[in-house]
Image (spheres, rainbow, N blue to C red):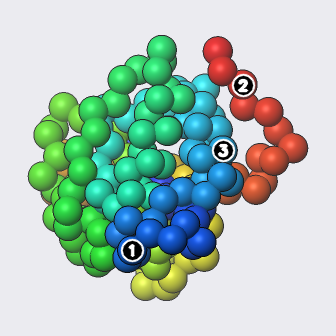
């Protein structure tokens, strides 16, 4: 069975003073949460073979920090997909369908509201907008035998983890 990990970028720094939404970096909380979530996935044995990320600064930082936290357990390949910034769920589906058949665990890193909508639609919950907090991770089991035939609604939700729920837990390296 294939696994799809859907990740909303970490908490961004609205007061950073950078020009434009695309260039907004992570806030301190985002820089803390992303490695924690990466370590959590590594401990669960869910190292992505491929990460497809929005190229926006906050998403790229989240991707880099999560991937670095997984080092030693695996080395995910990362591709930045221009279409994943300001996209629709159908653009996520199109990106997933282009993934090589050899990829067993795929991670998408993107933005709300689309990421919350994708979790809902992919897990057969219908068209609703899920409140999907920053740096949350949804793990979906994909029923399709090949990414090329991926369809919304063709997954089951294995878990949804929110960083705030882990604040009293310690996810250590090693």
- Give the mark, 2 or 3, whose residue is nearer the N terminus: 3
The x, y position of residue 131, in whole percent, is: 60, 76
- Give the mark, 1 or 3, whose residue is nearer the N terminus: 1
The residue under label 3 is 32
Q: Is residue 59 left or right of residue 138?
A: left
Tell me the residue at 48%/48% (across/down).
62
Q: Is residue 2 left or right of residue 40?
A: left
The residue under label 1 is 19
- Nearer the observer: mark 1 or 3; the answer is 1
- Give the mark, 1 or 2, whose residue is nearer the N terminus: 1
* Secondary structure beneath label 3: helix
In the displayed structure, would residue 66 be above or below residue 172? below
The x, y position of residue 121, in whole percent, is: 40, 73
- Nearer the observer: mark 1 or 2; the answer is 1
- Nearer the observer: mark 2 or 3; the answer is 3
* Secondary structure beneath label 1: loop
Mark 3: give few (<14), some (14-19) or many (20+) Cα within 10 Å. Answer: some
For residue 74, which quarter of the picture?
A: top left
- Work out how far the residue at label 1 is from the one at label 2, CA to CA, in angstroms: 36 Å
Mark 2: give few (<14), some (14-19) or many (20+) Cα within 10 Å. Answer: few
In this view of the protein, can residue 123 be seen by the observer? no
Tell me, yes or no, whether the two marked residues, 2 and 3, touch with CB atoms within 8 Å: no
Residue 174 or 22: which is nearer the viewer? 22
Tell me, yes or no, whether the two marked residues, 1 and 3, touch with CB atoms within 8 Å: no
The x, y position of residue 3, in whole percent, is: 39, 43
Residue 116 or 30: which is nearer the viewer? 30
- Work out how far the residue at label 1 is from the one at label 3, CA to CA, in angstroms: 24 Å
Tell me the residue at 24%/51% (across/down).
80
The residue under label 2 is 172
């Amino acid at each position: 069975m294939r696994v799809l990990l859907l990740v909303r970028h970490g908490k961004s720094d609205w007061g950073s003073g950078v020009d434009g939404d695309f260039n907004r970096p992570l806030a301190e909380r985002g820089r803390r949460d992303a490695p924690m979530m990466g370590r959590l996935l590594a401990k669960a044995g869910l190292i992505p073979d491929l990460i497809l990320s929005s190229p926006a600064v906050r998403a790229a930082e989240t991707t880099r920090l999560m991937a670095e936290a997984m080092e030693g357990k695996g080395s995910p390949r990362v591709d930045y997909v221009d279409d994943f910034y300001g996209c629709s769920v159908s653009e996520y589906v199109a990106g997933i369908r282009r993934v090589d058949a050899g990829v067993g665990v795929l991670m998408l890193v993107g933005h709300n509201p689309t990421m919350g909508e994708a979790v809902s639609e992919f897990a057969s919950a219908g068209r609703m907008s899920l409140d999907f907090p920053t740096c949350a991770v949804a793990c979906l089991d994909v029923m399709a035998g090949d990414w090329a035939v991926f369809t919304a609604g063709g997954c089951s939700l294995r878990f949804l983890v929110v960083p705030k729920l882990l604040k009293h837990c310690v996810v250590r390296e090693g």
